[in-house]
Image: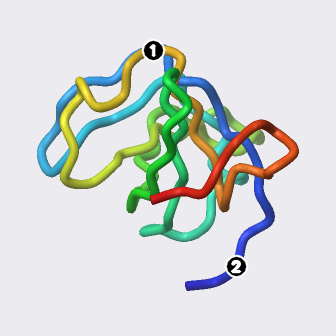
């Protein structure tokens, strides 16, 4: 696994079940995502953190702009990602109030 600089991708607004896992919205610019599959850290509203495997699903082509992609977290259910869950590439920085991911 290639090391990634920590970056908050988005805060979950909606999660819905799909074959093989769950897709999270809002969509993000695909140029912000590494080649699939990749690891993300999710920080739930209660502060707990978990590492998960994810892929990017291109959702919308925007002409000359990078396509928008939805994040698919593999092997999970939609109720595991309530609204307000933060999705990060890499670890949540310790100065952001996060602890160790599990």
Q: Residue at x 58, y 32 (%)?
A: 86
Q: In the current view of this chain or complex, which residue is farthest to the right? A: 95
Q: Is mark 1 on a helix, strand or loop?
A: loop
- Horizontal side of 2 relative to 24 (left or right) equals right
In this image, 93 relative to 50: left or right?
right
| Residue named by callout 1 | 83
**Residue in front for this viewpoint, 44 or 56:** 44
Query: Local crowd at mark 2 within 10 Å, few (<14), some, or many (≥20)?
Result: few
Image coordinates for residue 77, horizontal then vertical, percent: 19, 35
In the image, residue 24 above or below residue 29: above
Q: In this view, does 15 lie above or below 52?
A: above
Please rate how many residues cluster around mark 1, counting C-alpha atoms within 10 Å: few if below 14, some from 14 to 19, many from 20. Answer: some
Q: Percent position (x, y) of residue 28?
A: 62, 35
Which residue is outermost to the bottom?
1
Question: What sort of colour scheme is used for the picture?
Answer: rainbow
Task: Left or right? Give the position of 89 relative to 50.
Answer: right
Q: Which of 38 and 56 is in front in this view?
A: 38
Q: CA–CA distance between discs 2 and 1?
A: 28 Å
> Residue at (49%, 24%) from the top-left corner?
46
Q: Is residue 86 left or right of residue 51?
A: right
Q: Earlier in the sequence, mark 2 or mark 1?
A: 2
Residue 75 in percent (x, y) is at 19, 53
For mark 2, give the secondary structure: loop
Give me the disc on residue 8. none
Q: Which quadrant: the N terminus?
A: bottom right
Q: Of residues 57 and 77, which is closer to you in this image?
A: 77
Q: Which residue is drawn at 33% across and 35% down?
A: 23
Residue, disc 2 = 3
Residue furthest to the left: 19
Quadrant position of the C terminus in the picture: bottom left
């Amino acid at each position: 696994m290639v090391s990634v600089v920590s970056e908050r991708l988005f805060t979950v607004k909606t999660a819905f079940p799909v074959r093989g896992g769950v897709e999270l919205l809002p969509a993000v610019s695909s140029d912000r995502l590494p080649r699939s599959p990749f690891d993300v850290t999710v920080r739930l509203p209660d502060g707990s953190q978990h590492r998960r495997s994810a892929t990017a699903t291109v959702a919308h082509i925007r002409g000359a702009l990078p396509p928008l992609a939805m994040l698919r977290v593999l092997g999970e259910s939609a109720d595991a990602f309530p609204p307000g869950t933060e999705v990060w590439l890499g670890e949540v920085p310790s100065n952001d109030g996060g602890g160790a991911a599990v």
